[in-house]
Image (cartoon, rainbow, N blue to C red):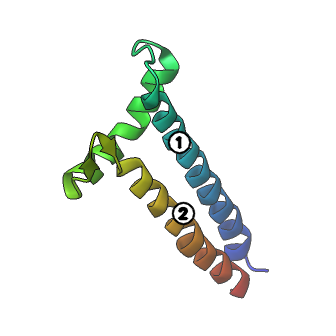
């Protein structure tokens, strides 16, 4: 194993875990949006502040809202799953093949 392999494998794992954590934050925000949550609660504020910049960009590019249902979180989760299955796996194979 070269130095690049030893350095790249933990980075790939870190990227995978960060993407997984962000996906769970998005799911938490979607669940919170279904109930009447207190906007001043620190957890609710964190969920909105952590996800709104990305979700607002998706809403601007693809205005998909039918009947009051916002599909931006679903699209973002699909993008994260694509990144986990394509980008992370490609980087992992690249690190193993070096």
- Left or right, residue 73 beside residue 21: left
- Residue drawn at 20 percent across, 51 percent down: 60
Residue 68 on image: x %, y %: 28, 39
Q: Quadrant of the N terminus?
A: bottom right
Left or right? Give the position of 36 relative to 5: left
* Dot 2 and dot 1 residues touching (CB under 8 Å): no
Please tell me in which quadrant of the rendered image residue 24 appears.
Answer: top right
**Residue nearer the viewer, 67 or 20:** 67
- Residue at 43% of width from left, 22% of height from top? 45
**In front here: 50 or 2?**
50
Nearer to the camera, 28 or 80: 28
The percent coordinates of residue 32 (x first, y second) are: 48, 28
Q: Residue furthest bottom?
A: 97
Q: Mark 2: few, some, or many residues within 10 Å (few <14, many ≥20)? A: some
Number of other residues with Cα within 10 Å of mark 1, as a class: few under 14, some 14 to 19, many 20 or more: some
Q: Residue at x 39, y 31 (%)?
A: 49
Is 90 above or below relative to 18? below
Quarter of the image with the C terminus is bottom right
| Extreme residue in the front direction | 67
Read off the residue under disc 2: 81
Q: From the viewer's perspective, is 24 left or right of 4? A: left
Of the residues under marks 2 and 1, which one precedes in the sequence? 1
* Residue tagged 1: 27
Q: Quadrant of residue 53?
A: top left
- The residue tagged with tag 2: helix, strand or loop? helix
Compared with 9, 32 (above or below) is above
Q: How many marks?
A: 2
Q: Nearer the viewer, residue 3 or 46?
A: 46
Image coordinates for residue 18, horizontal then vertical, percent: 59, 50
Residue at x 21% of width, y 53% of height: 63
């Amino acid at each position: 194993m070269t130095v690049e392999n030893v350095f790249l494998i933990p980075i790939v794992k870190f990227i995978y875990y960060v993407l997984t954590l962000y996906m769970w934050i998005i799911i938490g925000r979607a669940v919170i949006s279904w109930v009447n949550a207190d906007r001043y609660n620190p957890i609710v504020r964190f969920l909105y502040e952590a996800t709104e910049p990305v979700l607002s960009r998706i809403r601007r590019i693809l205005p998909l809202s039918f009947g009051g249902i916002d599909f931006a979180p679903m699209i973002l989760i699909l993008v994260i799953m694509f990144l986990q299955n394509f980008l992370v796996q490609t980087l992992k194979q690249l690190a193993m093949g070096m």
